[in-house]
Image: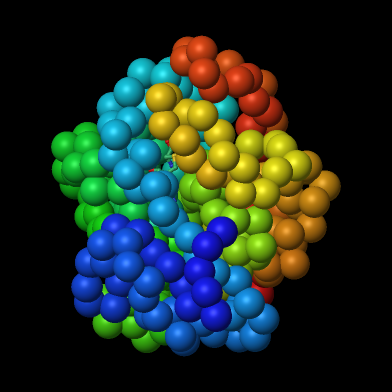
Amino acid sequence: MSGEGGRRVHDGAEHGGQVTDGAAVDHYADDYEGFEDFDRLALDRSGQAEAFDAIGDRYDEAFPHKDGQVSAGQWLADALAPGSRVLDVGCGTGLPTGRQLVEAGHELVGIDISPGMLALARENVPAATFHQADIVDLRAGGRYGPGGARDLGEFDAIVAFFSLLMLPRPEIPYALRALRGLLRPGGLLALAMVEADVDDFALPFLGNSVRVSGYLRDELRRVVRDAGFEIAAEDSHSYAPASTDVPPEIQLYLHCRRSV
Ligand SMILES: C[S@@+](CC[C@H](N)C(=O)[O-])C[C@H]1O[C@@H](n2cnc3c(N)ncnc32)[C@H](O)[C@@H]1O
């Protein structure tokens, strides 16, 4: 991670009404509300959006046959009342999950830091609404969070498939709490992570490099519960991507409910 003197460095996404160009910015002075030690962290997103911009629709080619993801999306779609409001965090291309939720009759809002991914998502799921935003922008007082200038409002459910793993590990508990703050009491969270004991690990990924984090499953359960969720069910899948530069992985799907 980079950043100095408690200032958070961000690269290339919208913040505080502006689009940054990689220069150090201090829009995080308000921190994740309630998480007093968060100012010890520096947010470094350098290269993450750019990698996904460059990957584009090769992402869906490299990750075909998403049986586990489709099952987890179906769990969420079926558990919700018709017309529920769902936030897709790190929505990627909108396939398969965004489209699946819209086809099930739900109202979908997606956020992602990659303009390239968002362009594909808008094409793939035209009935949904998408915003270029960072997960950190969803915290209370953040631009898209409760009380923020572009507050997205309350959701019946959130889906975060393989997006929180793009954060440095110390940030993940805060991000989960921020997501909890967007859910109505009893609201649902469908979470997918890759099982791996890594923090901010540079991974070669479809000709680019992205930094990823993960937990072994007991630790992931603990982090999720500590953030204020009950785990109603879980599922794991061994997954071998089509691409040769991405190793096989164990995918963990957690079906969670906001504790009241
Ligand atoms: C591995 S992809 C998963 C995409 C999609 N959720 C899926 O399951 O197919 C991770 C996505 O998270 C986005 N992302 C990475 N860091 C992010 C951040 N800090 N805030 C919002 N989105 C982020 C990437 O641009 C990418 O689209």
Residue extending furthest toward the front: 4
For the rendered model, the colour scheme is: rainbow
Q: Looking at the picture, does residue 138 appear above or below residue 80?
A: below
**In which quadrant will I find the C terminus?**
bottom right
Residue 44 visible here? yes
Q: Looking at the picture, does residue 14 appear above or below residue 163?
A: below
Closer to us: 203 or 247? 203
Q: Looking at the picture, does residue 4 appear above or below residue 71?
A: below
At x 71%, y 38%, the residue is 196
Toward which corner of the image does residue 21 lie, by quadrant? bottom left
At x 55%, y 34%, the residue is 203
At x 44%, y 79%, the residue is 28
**In which quadrant will I find the N terminus?**
bottom right
At x 48%, y 78%, the residue is 7
Marker count (numbered)? 0
Q: Is residue 46 toward the left or the right of residue 200 in the image?
A: left
Toward which corner of the image does residue 188 lie, by quadrant? bottom right
Residue 181 visible here? no
Residue extending furthest toward the right: 218
